Image: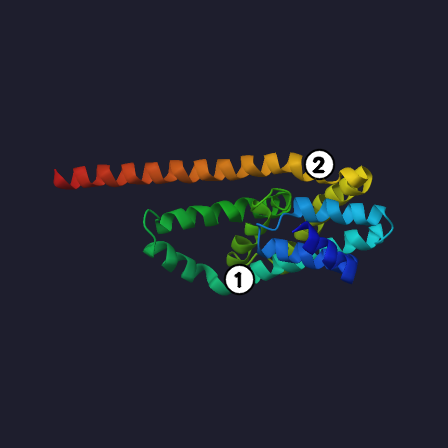
Amino acid sequence: MTDWLVGLMESLGAPGAGIAIALENLFPPLPSEVILPLAGFTASRGEMDLVDVLVCTTLGSVIGALALYWVGALLGRERVLALAAKLPLIKTSDIEKTEAWFQRHGRKTVFFGRMIPVFRSLISIPAGVERMPLPMFTLLTTVGSLIWNTIFVMAGYLLGEQWSLVESYVGIGSKVVIGLVVLAIGVFVVRRLAERRKGRHAHRR
């Protein structure tokens, strides 16, 4: 992956880094924790302008987020509810509760969500489903992405040849986030199965 990123930046410069970040939003397995520090390191060598890197990567973040926003918008609330009704262990009330929560905390979720691994890509979809006003979504995404991108680009810029240390440390945080998500899903499944069993026993009585 590093060779591919290096080749992309050598061919296109800062816009190449922006394209990589746009793809990272659409395909979370492409880690920004690698792309951004590497872009910063490349800038430190004088091969790209630092400001151009920050502008292009933030623009890439916004473009990727808007693409997922429109996926959610096109999918729409009714389709989400229809899909939820067909999924095992999922109730439409779960979606309605999530919807109510997002309506209360949507702005903070979009802003801070841009700085959480994995979650930073996924948050754009419910924002689209709920049709958060596009100017507000774009503003929050831009500011949150600029903060995240600046931290990692500057880390790579300052660390130089040791830029890969950033991915090593942040990778731990990403694993923690993924672990918490898996744990939350496991707890949800166990509770839902327990509710079904209680319902069956009550029905038999």
Depicted 10 relative to depicted 37: above or below: below
Nearer to us of marks 2 and 1 is 2
* Residue drawn where x is 45% and y is 39% of the image: 182
Q: Quadrant of residue 163?
A: top right
Q: Are marks 2 and 1 in contact (CB under 8 Å)?
A: no
Label 1: which residue? 71
> In the current view of this chain or complex, which residue is farthest to the left?
205
Q: Position of residue 121 (x, y in %)?
A: 58, 51
* Front residue of this view, candidates 13 and 97: 13
Q: Is residue 5 left or right of residue 98?
A: right
Badge 2 marks a residue whose secondary structure is: helix
Give the quadrant of the C terminus. top left
Mark 2 nearby-residue class (10 Å; few <14, some 14–19, many ≥20): some
Q: Residues within 10 Å of mark 1 (few under 14, many from 20)?
A: some
**The disc label shown at residue 133, or none:** none
User: Judging from the image, what secondary structure is the residue with disc 1 in?
Assistant: helix
Front position in the image: 7 or 60: 7
Give me the C-alpha separation between circle 2 and circle 1. 35 Å
Front residue of 83/32: it is 32
Q: Position of residue 40 (x, y in %)?
A: 78, 46
User: Amino acid under label 1?
Assistant: Val
Q: Residue at x 62, y 60 (%)?
A: 66
Q: How is the image coloured?
A: rainbow
In the image, what residue type sits under mark 2? Leu
Task: Work out whether residue 135 can be spotted.
Answer: no
Residue at the disc numbered 2: 165
Q: Is residue 205 above or below residue 90?
A: above
Is residue 28 found left or right of 42 in the rendered image?
A: left
Residue at figure coordinates x 34%, y 53% from the top left: 87
Residue at left 77%, top 62%?
11
